[in-house]
Image (spheres, rainbow, N blue to C red):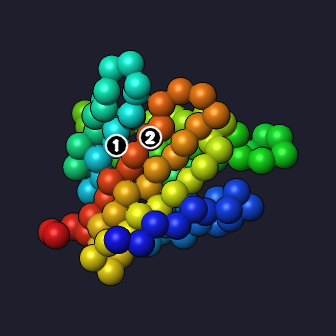
């Protein structure tokens, strides 16, 4: 497994490319709360993509959208990200993106190639 931290100057470019390359891939989204433990927000929903609120000097909110029908759509927002790390395994066919915010729980987005 190879883990890399994405420089904040590259966040928008990274997530734009990731969204294009992984659209429709199954994702599981978890928040890691110290108080309550891991909280699963979505499981095996098709990735729609990542977007940013870019008002200000740096991206201040990341939105991840998943699901392929109105009954199973979800959007999760992460305010004030400080660190974004990507752990790829299996030659990029699966991995995890960790978004660590300035305060509150980190978010993990686990992804894998469809059918894998």
Q: Residues within 10 Å of mark 1 (few under 14, many from 20)?
A: many
SS label for mark 2: strand
Q: Residue at 40% of width from left, 46% of height from top?
A: 108
Of 27 and 75, the residue lying toward us: 27
Q: Is residue 6 left or right of residue 107?
A: right
Q: Residue at x 32, y 80 (%)?
A: 91
Q: Which of 18/105 is in front?
A: 105
Q: Do labels 2 and 1 touch, CB within 8 Å?
A: yes
For this orientation, the residue located farthest to the left is 115
Q: From the image, which quarter does the N terminus lie in? A: bottom left
Measured as percent of width and height from the top left, residue 3 is found at 46, 66
> Mark 2 or mark 1: which comes first in sequence?
1
* Residue 10 visible to an observer of this rendering: yes
**Residue 109 image offset from top left, x and y in percent:** 38, 50
Tell me the residue that label 1 is attached to. 29
Per the image, the residue denoted by label 2 is: 107
Query: Judging from the image, what secondary structure is the residue with disc 1 in?
Result: strand
Identify the residue at image location x=32%, y=59%.
111
């Amino acid at each position: 497994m190879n883990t890399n931290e994405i420089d904040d100057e590259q966040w928008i470019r990274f997530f734009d490319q990731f969204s294009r390359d992984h659209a429709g891939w199954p994702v599981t989204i978890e928040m890691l709360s110290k108080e309550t433990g891991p909280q699963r927000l979505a499981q095996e929903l098709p990735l729609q993509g990542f977007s940013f609120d870019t008002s200000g000097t740096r991206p201040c909110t990341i939105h991840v959208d998943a699901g392929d029908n109105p009954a199973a759509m979800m959007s999760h927002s992460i305010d004030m990200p400080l660190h974004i790390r990507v752990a790829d395994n299996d030659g990029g066919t699966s991995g995890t993106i960790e978004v660590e915010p300035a305060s509150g729980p980190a978010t993990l987005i686990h992804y894998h190639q469809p059918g894998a």
